[in-house]
Image (cartoon, rainbow, N blue to C red):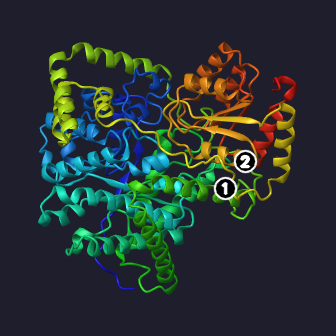
């Protein structure tokens, strides 16, 4: 193959943010000094779901999975000594995207930046939140309207900014097949473009299409994943040309950033994850035609907890070695004309087109949310079944499980632990901010924001004004809740048994037997306390428990400990399962256990699942938790057997 002009490297990012704005700022400046070329901001769950750090639902979640940003002061500290006009910043923010972008613009103006030169991305994709990640606030239609508000504002005022990342990343994390990932992401993009088309002059619409970017996932089957990316390129070009009449090929270019797959990272033999991450990166870099514009990699220990700076550095060095030491960027596309690749790409496109037509017949992405959610839960169940049956080999998990202890897991457990004191310190700063701001200016700004939301006007200008006036994240989101209402997404788990009962005969018989002794069907309550929206595990536990014959109760995400205990009383639950992946398991489980004792439900066994270090597991056991499950407990049938054993009729009053 003849050499061509050397390609520029992709943007090298690290997804980062934790504890406080000050600590995250130090991390960003350190990463930039190590050669990172763009920022990727992780926000904590209260910020993502529109709550201030002192809200009841924020308890235990502040600073855990990202940085808490409650107001302009926090955003100012986050980007201290980082010139935003020269930066390319990706913000993984969805429901509160208009607000965080407003804060970012306000800080940039304070720095003296030319706002029209700002470059970066807000994820701003709510449809995938309803399907897989769970940080939504408002119902789909007003959320789609706010996505369009951001896009319309950016097109006019911040033209180099990507106002939306259509995010298929979490779809694959929720079990999507490549065809589903393609179809559901493209259907989301179509819904947004249909919403935007009436808002701008026809001659400007193609350029607006050109600002929509994507954020995708690359899994371990890297040939299939590379073909998926080539299919994305072709299908996006096809949709923009045929559906929207975009003639300029520049505006039809499929532009995407990527984080490679975290779903496949293992708690067992975690050092193997380094190789997984490298192989997955190849899927989005080898093919020039479908190469990512920005890459961020997880760290080897993300199945264990929060990576340390050294862990993130190691992942960044992986990118730098590929981009700067190898000759990859000196060549054209390595796969053009390859018959195996071409055939696979066509197969994926055909499957995606069929599913897109199916969604279109239902009225598009917004109208199909419940359908897509149920299909993802089914696909994820199939994925787990294949691992349990050893049809899918996962090294160190279901094959070659014997090994040496990892020397990387040092005395700190190989992860960073956020100091619990961070939460109260953040609340103190928030209270100081409220006491020092101009209350009249805040009231006026909130009134203007409320008027814009109610009238259907674009919320971006009043949001920026509110940011400058000192409005907080919780106050901004509360106005959106009042104007547009709140939403409870579908769980994808129906009460009726699926057809996936093969191999469950013994478990079903055991459930029947214990139910007979109890005098009614074994009642299993699955609850997700706090703000964690990673519901895949809880869904699969509920799905399998139902297919084993248990009477399940699963209401979805974002429940308070009080609501979970109330449901346990009302449902007369025999066993309670709590799922928490955000690292807030200690305070939330402690709260649930105290409320159960107060309600006289000490005899109801509680099991907990999540990313839980050994030290924390010991603390949970001391609180009275009966069983603890982490990602290494992938055999769902073994968990079901434990639950049947725990529900001992001798200790529970039969009815």
Q: Position of residue 511 (x, y in %)?
A: 82, 42
Q: Position of residue 505 (x, y in %)?
A: 83, 53
**How packed is label 2: few (under 14 Cα within 10 Å), some, or many (20 or more)?**
some
Using the image as rendered, state which of residue 264 and residue 329 is in the foreground: 264
Q: Is residue 139 above or below residue 324?
A: above
| 392 sits left or right of 255 in the view | right
Using the image as rendered, state which of residue 627 and residue 29 is in the foreground: 627
Quarter of the figure that contains the N terminus: bottom left
Which residue is drawn at the image coordinates 60% and 57% (left, top)? 378
Using the image as rendered, state which of residue 627 and residue 539 is in the foreground: 539
Q: Which residue is mark 2?
A: 636
| 477 sits left or right of 400 in the view | left
Residue 289: which quarter of the image?
bottom left
Which residue is drawn at the image coordinates 37% and 73% (left, top)? 235
Q: In this orientation, does residue 10 appear?
A: no
Q: In this orientation, does residue 105 appear?
A: yes
Q: Position of residue 476 (x, y in %)?
A: 28, 30
Q: Secondary structure at mark 2?
A: helix
Q: Secondary structure at mark 1?
A: helix
Question: Disc number at residue 536?
Answer: none
Which residue is drawn at the image coordinates 38% and 18% (left, top)? 427
Q: Is residue 461 above or below residue 196?
A: above
Q: Which residue is mark 1?
A: 384
| 172 sits left or right of 459 in the view | right
Contact between labelled residues 1 and 2, with CB atoms less than 8 Å apart:
yes
């Amino acid at each position: 193959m003849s050499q061509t002009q050397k390609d520029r490297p992709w943007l090298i990012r690290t997804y980062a943010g934790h504890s406080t704005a000050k600590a995250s700022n130090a991390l960003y400046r350190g990463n930039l000094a190590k050669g990172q070329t763009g920022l990727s901001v992780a926000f904590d769950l209260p910020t993502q779901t529109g709550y201030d750090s002192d809200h009841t639902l924020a308890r235990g979640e502040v600073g855990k999975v990202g940085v808490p940003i409650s107001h302009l002061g926090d955003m100012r500290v986050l980007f201290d000594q980082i010139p935003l006009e020269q930066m390319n910043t990706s913000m993984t923010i969805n429901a509160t995207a208009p607000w965080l972008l407003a804060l970012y613009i306000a800080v940039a103006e304070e720095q003296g930046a030319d706002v029209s030169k700002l470059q970066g991305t807000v994820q701003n994709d709510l449809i995938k939140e309803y399907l897989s990640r769970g940080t939504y606030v408002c119902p789909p239609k007003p959320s789609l309207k706010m996505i369009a508000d951001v896009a319309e504002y950016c097109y006019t005022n911040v033209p180099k900014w990507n106002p939306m990342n259509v995010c298929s990343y979490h779809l694959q994390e929720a079990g999507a097949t490549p065809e589903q990932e393609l179809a559901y992401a493209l259907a989301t993009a179509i819904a947004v473009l249909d919403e935007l088309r009436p808002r701008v002059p026809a001659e400007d619409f193609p350029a607006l299409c050109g600002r929509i970017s994507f954020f995708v996932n690359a899994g371990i089957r890297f040939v299939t994943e590379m073909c998926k990316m080539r299919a994305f390129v072709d299908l996006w070009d096809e949709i923009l040309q045929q559906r929207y009449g975009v003639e300029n090929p520049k505006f039809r270019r499929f532009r995407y950033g990527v984080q490679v797959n975290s779903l496949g990272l293992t708690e067992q033999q975690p050092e193997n994850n380094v190789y997984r991450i490298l192989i997955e990166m190849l899927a989005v870099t080898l093919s020039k035609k479908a190469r990512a514009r920005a890459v961020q990699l997880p760290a080897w220990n993300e199945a264990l907890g929060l990576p340390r700076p050294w862990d993130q550095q190691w992942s960044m060095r992986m990118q730098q070695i590929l981009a700067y030491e190898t000759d990859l960027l000196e060549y054209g596309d390595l796969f053009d004309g390859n018959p195996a690749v071409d055939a696979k790409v066509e197969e994926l496109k055909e499957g995606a087109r069929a599913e897109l037509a199916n969604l279109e017949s239902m009225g598009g992405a917004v109208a199909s949310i419940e359908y897509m959610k149920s299909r993802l839960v089914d696909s994820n169940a199939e994925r787990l079944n294949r691992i349990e049956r050893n049809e899918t080999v996962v090294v160190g998990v279901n094959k070659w499980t014997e090994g040496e202890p990892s020397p990387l897991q040092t005395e700190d457990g190989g992860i960073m632990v956020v100091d619990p004191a961070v939460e109260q310190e953040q609340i103190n700063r928030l209270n100081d901010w409220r006491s020092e701001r101009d209350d009249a200016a805040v009231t006026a700004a909130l009134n203007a924001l409320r008027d814009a939301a109610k009238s259907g006007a674009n919320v971006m200008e009043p949001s920026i004004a509110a940011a400058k006036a000192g409005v907080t994240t919780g106050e901004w989101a509360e106005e959106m809740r009042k104007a547009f209402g709140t939403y409870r997404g579908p769980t994808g788990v129906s009460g009726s048994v699926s057809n996936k009962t093969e191999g469950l005969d013994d478990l079903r018989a055991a459930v029947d037997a214990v139910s007979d002794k109890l005098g009614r069907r074994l009642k299993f309550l699955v609850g997700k306390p706090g703000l964690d929206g990673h519901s895949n595990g809880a869904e699969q536990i509920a799905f399998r428990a139902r297919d084993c014959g248990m009477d399940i109760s699963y209401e979805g995400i974002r429940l308070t400990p009080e609501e979970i205990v109330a449901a346990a009383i009302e449902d007369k639950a025999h066993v309670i399962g709590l799922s928490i992946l955000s690292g807030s398991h200690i305070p939330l489980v402690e709260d649930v256990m105290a409320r159960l004792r107060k309600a006289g439900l000490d005899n109801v066994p509680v099991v907990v699942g999540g990313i839980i270090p050994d030290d924390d597991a010991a603390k949970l056991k001391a609180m009275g938790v009966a069983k603890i499950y982490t990602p290494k407990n992938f055999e769902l049938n073994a968990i079901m057997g434990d639950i049947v054993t725990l529900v001992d009729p001798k200790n529970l009053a039969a009815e």
